[in-house]
Image: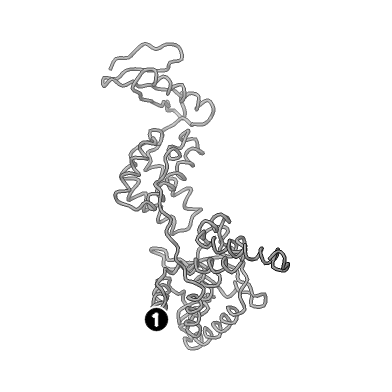
Amino acid sequence: MSRQRRGRGEGAVYKTETGTWRGAVDFGWKDGTRHRKYVSARTKAEAQQKIRELTRLAEEGRIIPGRVPTLEAWMNRYLDEVAAPTVRPSTLNRYRQETRLYIVPNLGRVKLDKLTPQHISDFYRTMLKRLAAGSVRRLHALLRRALTVAVRWKIIPTNPVLSVDPPSIRRAEITPWSLDETKSFLTFVENRPMAARWQLGVALGMRQGEVLGLSWSDIDFEGRTLRISKALQYQPGAGLRLVEPKTAQSRRTVALPDHVVTSLEKHREDQEVQRQTAGDSWIETGLVFTTSHGTPYSPRNDYRTFKTLVAQAGLPEIRLHDLRHTAASNMLTRGVQARVVMETLGHSQISLTMNTYSHVAPNVSRDAADVMGEALWASDPELS
């Protein structure tokens, strides 16, 4: 390589044997080690510009001199130190799997300060050949969060993921049951075991984990309310565990319809019979919905039971999670205010509620128009 004499303020710039220009910024000594950061460019002017930018960022305290980790090393640190204490175990397991299977094989060896939007864009295109768009968007979200922390910790000055748009996806069409179909299902399960479980899903839109994680101490029979404070979740290697709700807004208290209160009281009596029958083999968990020995009721068995009930009732096949959509749609079309629906479902924003259930907006709008027409003109024969 041939070094070129540099002018004042140009930094250590030289041309390599391959024709590219390379520069370095010396950050001095720290803990007995001299710290430098290097840049590469196609032209001398571009290399000098990169050096000036790097020097400015260091002077502003936006980047800390030192060895920059590879993306693989940083992801492992992020997952251990940042994600692990803050996310649910199942979410952390998914993060680790996505990192191991997709991020590390494709981008793991790239140092954070060398990671560019082009790297990220190419990564998404590669992944779209193997994964659905929704899965690639999850990878985008994971990288965005991890590199945002790297910026906050002054390891890199900017987050390259923010310059890349994730792949778009078509919102899945929601096909909840109609009110008549909902009534048919409730009638079918009325006198069956765990009827209250299905009533909670249909009337309140509770998530599966929220229903199965419900404790008797969460229910105020006198006040006819229910507190949602945890969820039952299967964790690989650990089995069924009670975990924090999905979001802060998921921790909520909701009012119970009288019929559901009555069903819960009957379910409590049925569970007491099971407890007496099981005797010493009964395992007390305090949960509302359990096996015949008191242990947590498996989400997998819950799903299978739902599919069987739907088939036996002769109703249109829907996903278990569509009970939640059914509840929301029925509430909105019956005139329940959107904010009340949002709070009942545990949504974080009212826009999420309305965007998710936009399919019921025309009916709600029509009902509102009819109500206003009745209020303003129906009582006056000359105006009606």
| Residue closer to the observer: 92 or 20 | 20
Badge 1: few (under 14), some or many (20 or more) residues near its Cα, within 10 Å?
few
Give the amino acid at mark 1: Gln
Up/down of 262 relative to 141, above or below: below
Rendered residue at 47%/35% (across/down): 158
Q: Which residue is disc 1 drawn over?
A: 312
The percent coordinates of residue 290 (x first, y second) are 48, 77
Say whether residue 76 is left or right of residue 226.
left
User: Dividing the image into 4 quarters, which one contains the C terminus?
Assistant: bottom right
Q: Where is residue 334, by image quadrant?
A: bottom right
Q: Secondary structure at mark 1?
A: helix
Res 144 visible: yes
- Tell me where residue 352 appears, x and y as whole percent: 54, 56
Which residue is at the front of the view, 33 or 231?
Answer: 231
Q: Residue at x 39, y 18 (%)?
A: 45
The residue positioned 47% from the left and 48% from the top of the image is 81
